[in-house]
Amino acid sequence: MSGHSEVEVKKQVTLYLRVFFALMALTVVTVAISYVHMPILLGVAVALFIACIKASLVAAFFMHLSTEKKIIIFILILTVFFFAFLLATPSLHHT
């Protein structure tokens, strides 16, 4: 055996189910937002915000980053910063 008690396994399964249902709920919210009439920029911003929350849940729990060392978290944050910079770069040169 791997040394995990039945209580610990049930606790982990419960946590994963909660994250799964949160992801499902956020997916339903994303679809519902698409039917709300709002300016395109606001709609995209809301959808990206929800997508970021969903990505954070997946990274934290399913990729086990919530229990990793600080250097991995730092590298992840640095990657997000550079990704945002690369996304914003074309808009800086738009005339």
Image (tube, rainbow, N blue to C red):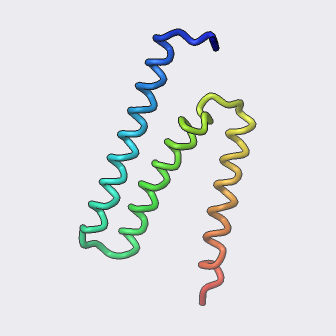
Residue nearest the observer in this picture, 61 or 47:
61
Q: Residue at x 64, y 78 (%)?
A: 90
State how many labels appear. Answer: 0
Q: Residue at x 28, y 72 (%)?
A: 38
Quadrant that contains the N terminus? top right
Quadrant that contains the C terminus? bottom right
Where does residue 71 sit, x and y in percent of width and height?
75, 36
Q: Quadrant of residue 92?
A: bottom right
Where does residue 59 sit, x and y in percent of width and height?
57, 42
Q: With respect to residue 4, does 92 lie above or below? A: below
Q: Quadrant of residue 42?
A: bottom left
Where does residue 51 sit, x and y in percent of width and height?
46, 55
* Residue most extreme to the left: 36
Residue nearest the observer in this picture, 88 or 48:
48
Residue nearest the observer in this picture, 92 or 75:
75
Q: Quadrant of residue 11?
A: top left
Q: With respect to residue 3, does 47 lie above or below? A: below
Residue nearest the observer in this picture, 13 or 77:
13
Q: With respect to residue 43, does 49 lie above or below? A: above
Give the side of residue 13 with respect to residue 27, left or right.
right
Where does residue 73 sit, x and y in percent of width and height?
67, 39
Q: Residue at x 42, y 54 (%)?
A: 50
